[in-house]
Amino acid sequence: MATQKPVEWVNSLMTRFEEQLPCRSGPQTTHSRINVEQNQSSLINISKYRFSLVIAGLTKILHCVNEMRQHSQFQPEFEKNFYESQLIVLDTLERCLSGQPKETSRYDEAMNVKTLLRELCQFIDVPSENHMVVQLKNLASKVIFSLSLNNFNAVFSRISARMQELSNSNEENPDFIDIELIQHINLDVTRLIKLLNEINQKFKSLKKNVYVVLMNSLEKAIWNWMDTYPKEFMDLQRKTNEELADCCDKLFDLLDNFAENNSKKRLNTWPLQMMLLVLNSKILEEIVNADAGAPFSPKHFRKRQFVESVKKALVPHAASKQLCEAAAVTCVRLCKTSTYINILDSSNVVFSLVQNVISDLKMLLFNPGKPYGRGQATVNQDVDLMIDCFVSCFRINPHNNEALKVCLNLNSPSTYHFVLVCSLYRIITQPRLGWWPQIDIVYNKAHELRNMFTDTLTKVTQGCIIHTPLRMIQLCQSLTLKEKVSTLKFKEKSEESPLSYKNLLLWMVRLIHADPVLMLNNQGKAGHEIQSSTLELINGLVSLIHQPSMPDVAQEAMEALLILHDPTNIEMWNPESPINTFWDVSSQVLFSISQKLIQHQIMNYTEILKWVREILKCRNAFLQKHKEYANLGSHIAICKQAHIKLEVVFFMYLWSVDIDAVLVSMSCFSLLCEEADIRCGQDDLTVTYMLPNYHVYQELSAASTILTTGRAALQKRIMTLLRKIEHCTQGCSQAWEDTFMNWECATKILVSYPKTKLEEAQICEGFHRTIGKRRASHQSTD
């Protein structure tokens, strides 16, 4: 059918893709996610040959989902399905557009662009109410960027037409979304010149309410160009592009006239004016060199006056508060721009200008005695400004750590801690230019960063430990674990301040995930001190996993612990004694999580089981690497306890109502067998000595990969295999006891239903608390 009737086949695939979206089929399971990913992959491949057909179909699907979302009222769990559906469609569009052939003038593709832009513009100006909305906006921006790469004329026409409409409009509150498209499009230097010419032509005819949006959008567009085509920017510093220089010169003068004698307007014009000056390197060089007595053209007098005004206003009390704020933003932009110039080009005048302002700038932004801030309404913008400044200062002079010292001090305001963590995260994750210094310069601050993590963790978790009743677990839908490929997850609306300790903790955990060495580095310390600090860090992360009030932090903590269990990182837990430390620390992690799973204190238990499986894989990889000494230090009590608890967990969750949890538990038995194989290889031990039920565990694991027809068949298969168990290990014995007690409790509740409907949660909670106490006293480690 695909070769004989390609259009019908593509339409059939589109229909199937739409029907499997969460808004149509309900919350995603593992199998439904796999189906969606397979359909998505097929559409992306087909788009290389039937581009217009696929894009038209995806645009239609996006329109339908948007319509359903806008004209319906849903409960939060259904709302999540629509967010996820929009994300899936946008992601597919972005990946199809990234592989699109070069720009074409075909009518059907031009119509597709216009229709798609209408849908995408809905996401640009949406308030960022929760994490999912932020994801939607970012992904929509990526789609526009990819769309404009090969369809620039169609996107530019929409921007130009809207500017013309606004020139003739008398609306009090016009729609600026099409103007905001400027900050999302793909611009090279030729397109930037075209955009600047268009703005210069229409600038004077625009109403005043358009200027701020236009200036902000243009500045962001210039930054996008520098990030996307840094070589073009570097070439401009060596050789002036006369056409671009002329455009920048004209727009600078237009902005200067617009903001003349108005301090409030300068807050919007000054940063863009500085960018325009840097793009016109010949004029900037003349202005800077004039201070040393070099010849200076009178026609550039206002530009020189502008530079002097910015430098003067940066010093507090030397200018008005508004001018000081405008100067701070402008100088941060200047410093950031200088980092895009190769440090080998030391004679560049931008560096000279930066050296004139950088000390005053750091004094203004990083003064704990007088923290910088323009007011509550601009907290986020102020923090972003400080992050830009910190990162730029690091790249300009990485060994001058005045700002770093201020931000690392636990007595400094928490804003500085947040700025530090976000700055380090950006330094690690942002694609690097060749001359940017690497994060390893900061590794010697690991001790201070660990102290900050511990301090923040203590402040956040005081009073937050919650034991969740079984009834709640049974009724709540499990959260989704972010797997190796980016999956989509919903975050509830948060009333937390962006600078709250909880948000700081979230970013600290993300920082650990991004580069664990930042927290693991312990050069010059004794082995027992290193092990102690590692244990404190890892136990802190473990405590976050079962925090139902902070699912986003718990998710990141799981990812951080997984990366810490990478064999290379395990080596750093204690380089003097890696094997012994591994058994001690990792066993404590597994013991703690297993205990919570056994006591039913974790709602998203299926995802935690998947995570435990990944941890076990990492453990086995490390043991395989050190198989000659694999048993060294493994005879301590916590190792035996952790192994017993793992067996209990995997047995107990064979009876889970979630079939995914059952299959994951079955598959985990093979990892216990693999560990036994590695450990027995060098000590002339048999695997059955270490794992008496080795062969049954192998069969249980193998059964998880066999396709079965429903839950009943799977449970029958499990029972058949369990009857083969001949050795009643401690884990096996406890699992049977706990299973019986769970069954007995559930039976009582069902028998008395609905008489005790209101009391059942308390009964179950008390029951599990009793089981927990019994286990604690009953546990043997012999």
Image: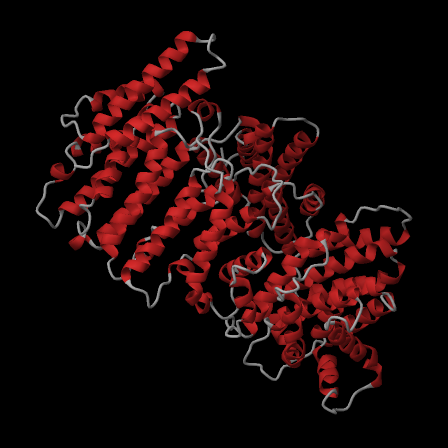
Which residue is found at the position 80% from the left and 62% from the top?
A: 199
Res 680 → quadrant: top left
Image height check: is 720 above or below 684? above
Residue 527 shows in the view: yes
Residue toward you, 175 or 501: 501
* x then y, percent, for residue 672: 23, 39
* x then y, percent, for residue 368: 61, 64
Residue toward you, 194 or 737: 737
Image height check: is 91 above or below 310? above
Residue 166 appears left or right of 364: right
Residue toward you, 452 or 521: 452
Residue at far left of view = 684
Residue 707 shows in the view: no
* x then y, percent, for residue 670: 24, 37
Indicate the colouring scheme. secondary structure
Residue toward you, 37 or 77: 77
For the image, the number of numbered tags is 0
Which residue is found at the position 42% from the left and 44% from the top?
A: 558
Residue 131 appears left or right of 1: right
Residue 28 appears left or right of 226: left
Image height check: is 498 above or below 650? below
- Which quadrant is the C terminus positioned in? top left
Which residue is found at the position 22% from the left and 31% from the top?
A: 731
* x then y, percent, for residue 588: 30, 44
